[in-house]
Image: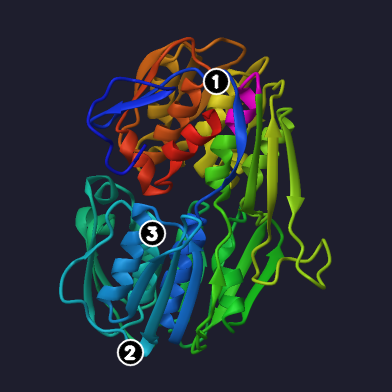
Amino acid sequence: MNAVAPRPARVPSGPLSDAADVVEVRPAPRLRGTLRLPGDKSISHRALLLAALAAGTSRLSGVGDGQDVRTTAGLVSALGATVNRRAAADGRVDYRVVSPGIDGLTEPEDILDCGNSGTSLRLLAGILAGRPFHAVLSGDASLRGRPLGRIVRPLRSMGAAIAARRGGTLAPISIDGRSPLTAIDHATEVPSAQVKSAVLLAGLRADGVTSVSEGVATRDHTERMLRARGVAVGTEAIDDTVRVSVAGGQQILAFDEVVPGDVSAAMFWLVAGAIHPDAELVLEGVGLNPTRTAAVDILRRMGADVVVEPTLHPGTDPAVDAVMGEPAGRLSVRSSTLRAVDLGPVDVAAAIDEIPVLCLAATQASGTSTIRGAGELRVKESDRVAGIAAGLTALGARIEVDGDDLTIHGGGALRAARTDALLDHRLAMTFAVAGLIADGPTFVTAASSAAISYPAFFDDLERVLA
């Protein structure tokens, strides 16, 4: 099944069928298989952008091939780097990026279209703030509705001239950069690795040390990847905050990167295996960055039978990260008996992308689960609080929404239903997984949105059903 461009309507012949942009998922008698997941989306974005900042040739292996990552590759090309994409034998993608380096990047000839990718827009804004030319960033309707004030304010304070809709809060956003920028000490308004990364990337073009302080530590891919490319990055814990800093003027070195499998994508299979009554799944080469595995830990707290086996490189100790700076390993899951969980704002921030599929897991747990402080989910590709509640309610789950808090009553069987993914890839995949245990066919509209991060999702779904 091709999730990017679903085939014309056909007579269903197996557990999955599709028509136009609606996918039908039928209940599965069992789940078995070993999967190798797409390259981590967050790391793939950063690998391409950092390759653009490094003078020379960077070779990137196992890169995610979702629409968002392809968007970033196009943006890098629009700024003057040469980008060559090659499909690898295992279905993943390799890139070769030849760049003149940050000082050689050129003013784009057109608006930079970031599509649906908030990571592309926010991180690129940080880069462009330190380049002395004019650029305009925009995207699709969803991206143009997502908040930008949290990056506009610090980048303006560093000296970049930025204009955006609604008083500097919504795209399109125009940037007239300057070099050098002014170094700042910035405290994030909400936990956001994208904001942190944007400020740190701008800080590389500042005239001093730029720091970002967070009340909740967010994913640290940018810091790890900068260090691997020769940039000194400081990290220190001060009271209840984590402070990350970079000195301006440092050069990024060209680097060959191997991108691990996406742990956010892995969560759909881990939940599928845990809630299905007859399941054994193995996921190879998954990224195990400790700032990204909170959702795995939460699912294990709920009682999921998930085994984590880190991959060791020759000469390394189990406590030491992998050679490339990003630890990886094998995850396996089998049918489990789940119990309810209580998640607060810190948990939500640590597992923000995986909350929708964790909500599905909670519907099959014994007891009542609570998820508090999920407001950030309302400004993703869709309002995920409303979307997940509507979809799972249609499937027969009992969910209550009070502001930004959710209460999920577990233990109930799911029923056949039609769900709307709202053009949101994480909702599309969550509802498809739910269909595996419903009492009849589940229809997922806007199913092709899964291609934003996981183009082969429905192919892999058919694979574990076979």
Residue 184 shows in this picture: no
Image location of residue 424, percent across then percent down? 36, 38
Mark 2 Cα shell of 10 Å, populated few (<14), some (14-19), many (≥20) = some
Please report whichever mark, 1 or 2, sits nearer to the chain's N-terminal start: 2
Q: Which range is magenta?
A: 271-278
Query: Whole-Å distance between the Cαs marked 1 and 2?
Result: 52 Å
Q: Is residue 17 above or below residue 69?
A: above
Query: 266 left or right of 169?
Result: right
**Secondary structure character of the magenta stretch overall:** helix
Q: Residue at x 53, y 25 (%)?
A: 360
- Mark 2 or 3: in front is 3
Q: Nearer the viewer, residue 68 or 402?
A: 68
For this rendering, which residue is in front, 300 or 31?
31
Q: Is residue 169 above or below residue 156?
A: above
Q: Amino acid at mark 3?
A: Val
Residue flagged by tag 1: what amino acid is it?
Answer: Thr
On whether residue 91 falls in the magenta region, the answer is no
Q: Which residue is mark 3?
A: 69
Disc ID at residue 407: 1
Residue 130 in view, yes or no: yes
> Which residue carries the number 2 mark?
104
Query: What is the secondary structure assignment of the residue under circle 3?
Result: helix
Q: Amino acid at mark 2?
A: Gly
State left or right for residue 185 relative to residue 141. Answer: right
